[in-house]
Amino acid sequence: MERRVVVTGIGCVTPIGTSPDDFASGLYAGRIGVGRLTVFDASQYPVQIAAEVHDWDLSSVGEDPTVWRKCPRQTRFAIGAGLQAALQAGLSDAQIDPVRFGVYLGCGEPFEDFTAFTQAVHDAQKSEKTFLDHALRIFDPDTEREYEPDMPAIHLAHILQAQGPVANCVSACVSSTQAIGEASRMIQFDEVDVMLCGGAHSTINPFGVTGFQRLSALSTRNDDPQGAVRPFDADRDGFVIGEGAALFIVEELEHARRRGAEILGEVTGYGSAQDAYRVTDIHPEGRGSATAMQRALQNAGLVPDQISYINAHGTGTPLNDRVETMAIKQAFGQQAYRIPVSSTKSMLGHATTACGAIELAVCLLSLRSGVIPPTMNHDSPDPDCDLDYVPRQPREVSCRHVLSNNVAFGGQNAALIVSRYEEASPATVPVSWAA
Amino acid sequence: MSSNNNRHSNQDRRIVITGIGVVSPMGRTVGRFWEALTHPLDVATKTDSGTALRASGIAHFDGRIEDFDDLPAPTRKTLRKSLKLMNRETQMGVAAGQQALLCSRLLERYESERVGVCFGAGNVSVMPEDFNSAVNACSDDQGEFEMDRWGTDGLSEIAPLWLLKCLPNMPTCHLAIINDLRGPNNTITQRDVSFALAIAEACRNIKCGDADAMLVGATGTTLNGMNLIHARLEDEVCDDSGHCDRQRCHTCGPKPFPAEGAGALVLEDLHVAQQRGAHIYGEVLGSSSAAFIGHDGASACGRALANAMRQSLRQARLSPAVIGHIHAHGLGQPNMQQAESRAIADVFGPAASDTPVVATKGRIGHACAGTEAMEVIASLLALEHDRLFPTDDAGGLPSSGQTEDGWNTAGDSFLSLSMFGRGLGSSIVVGAFRE
């Protein structure tokens, strides 16, 4: 029998809600998490806005925040979301074979301590000694050891005593989408029974803002933070950097049933593809994105008219939204005009490698609530973006299958489909490594 | 979620290796690499590559177009334009990938959407020299650095595409773009176990029908600024920047020297490879990783390693007694080496004493994620030539490649082992191809 993969735990820490319930309330209220950037002093920067997580720390999941003070923000978000998911899934009460329990995250690059880094560069310029000499003197070793992308996965494997595969992937804005898809594949291939998966990221630091600003990717609406992210709107001018995490417990269906876990949805489809066009630009017709969505549909055994809702990548950059619209039309044909599409980045900003996981949480919440979130700030239609973007107001839709789509710098694309859990499922061929 | 994705789906697919590429401190082509590996150690130190190795651990590779060997004219043109967007890790990864593709002759006839790329890589690689002019621009009349001028004076001095240059997923993106590979594309950033995870993921991509072939590899360095600092903080490399001969070094102890390098393999569905008459170097029989985190460092790694070995042997359906040789992680640190020896003894039992164990870090150095890719290629070449190469430092490991009578044969299969000091272990099983 095919091994089916179900979701039994959701955790999220986002700019508009720091638990799944709080997050759902924010989504359906159209709460916008964008404001003045406060994580560091950006008052002299060209871009001074961001979607930040405020008023939250790890005490909310029973951890002592001081223990984690030397970790980057993304690690703290990941620990928070991971523990929420594990709690909801009831992992602590369950008999789980630790060797069959793994972690696969898509956490992004945590840049170094900017002050220490630039000081070391400066000192090396002014002395005979090298950057290395100065850096080893200036950097705090305990802090610096934490600034690797795989540290959230390592910490969570430690806390939850997962002894199966522990992995982190970085493929820009599709990282966490791929992490969830590949974690689900590990379960299907009978390598594990349970995976903690998802992603966390924060590029709200001088390195991140500098990098995205130099790529001309950011909105410069400093005077109107709440109106800055305008996906699919004619007046869109770029994205706003966000941050946060969403993590899930995904589990083989019979394993979940045996331990009486509540099933929150089923991961039914996953597709990944490359544009193979340019590092700097997505393909002008979105060929990789269309292929990823088609593969996800094929993987789920679904046809386009069975999809109830698409959560778009929808960054709010002029190019992304036009091309993503084309890609959806390629993948869904005429059905594209019937399916509601929204971009929750209008509220959350762009959490880069974590965005796919956060948006999958949106999809799972919609499966359960029967409500899909709006695209905020969608005021002026763009003739090139002519789908139903659910402008400004949430909508009641009975969702059975929903698709989350993501696109990345460098040409990577990935899509996931989650479905309302139902007993019936097509039987397929068993999977094994051996010939 | 179905494990069968499309017309080529077949869970019993056998995955074979049809292309090899390497950029290492012991040669930047497969031929040079093997030649250097098989030299007796006292001779190897006198060769060009050996001298460079002992002096600085730097591969004979400058990232110029000439370093990429024989490429078709259009590929050469695209690559030449892309070089300025690549950091050194990316250049090495791309060079190894191009070699593997050329070796496999896969690109003579292929479907773009059926070939993907999956690599292991390190963290974001921020280079101090990219910040020199920006830091200068923020200096006052006395030459003191003024951080609060970054937003106005420093930021604009950063190259517009700087961020894209240093992201870890760039090797896979460039390889996909240069060669029009539109299949699945991902980058694993899990330090020393990245390559094993990448192999496992690429095999799943082929088995589930998303691709007919995957270019899989790993690239890494512990030589440049922040990577060296992180490796030093993790106590993984010696403190003398490689200006030592490990055979006789009394200052750095037994730790390997910092190094750099990359390796790549073309993995392919057996049926597809046979149809096109490809040369088959070996077959991937299993790849697994495991964790045992939060316990005493070295012994935890050993336990994780043992679990990974057992799992990979189960996947391969092989008993330890039939394994031809073991390519050990062989980091050189006594406690890690003891843990590795114990893991081998636990899993292999009595067969441990009859199975040759080789290690090459003493000669290649430690290039983080890139190391195991080079090690697997070394063992694959040993299978091809049916002889092992000398191992410099078996310290504590059960046995080595050299016997009193000459060189051991490589056997029909090998295990490649890797560990990361925070409690991770991985194991890859490769066999000689048999119908």
Image (cartoon, rainbow, N blue to C red):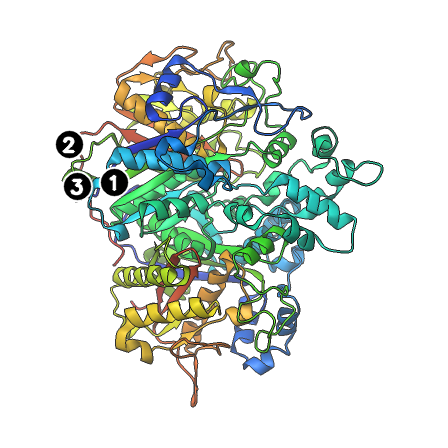
Q: Is residue A41 visible?
A: yes
In the rendered image, the vertical position of residue B315 relative to residue B361, given as above or below: above
Comes first in the chain, label 1 or label 2 = 1
Give the label on residue A91, or none. 1
Q: Which residue is mark 3?
A: A254
Residue A153, position in %: x, y? 40, 45
- Callout 1 touching callout 2 (CB < 8 Å): no
- Type of amino acid under label 1: Leu
For the residues beneath circles 1 and 2, the answer to whether they share a chain is yes
Chain letter belonging to callout 1: A
Q: Secondary structure at mark 2?
A: loop
Give the label on residue A423, or none. 2
- Callout 3 touching callout 2 (CB < 8 Å): no
Q: Nearer the viewer, mark 1 or mark 3?
A: 1
Comes first in the chain, label 3 or label 2 = 3
Residue A68, position in %: x, y? 46, 40
Q: Is residue B71 left or right of residue A434?
A: right
Comes first in the chain, label 1 or label 3 = 1
The quadrant in which residue B387 appears is bottom left
Distance of label 1 from label 2 (alpha carbons) = 23 Å
Distance of label 3 from label 2 (alpha carbons) = 11 Å
In the rendered image, the vertical position of residue B396 relative to residue A133, given as above or below: below
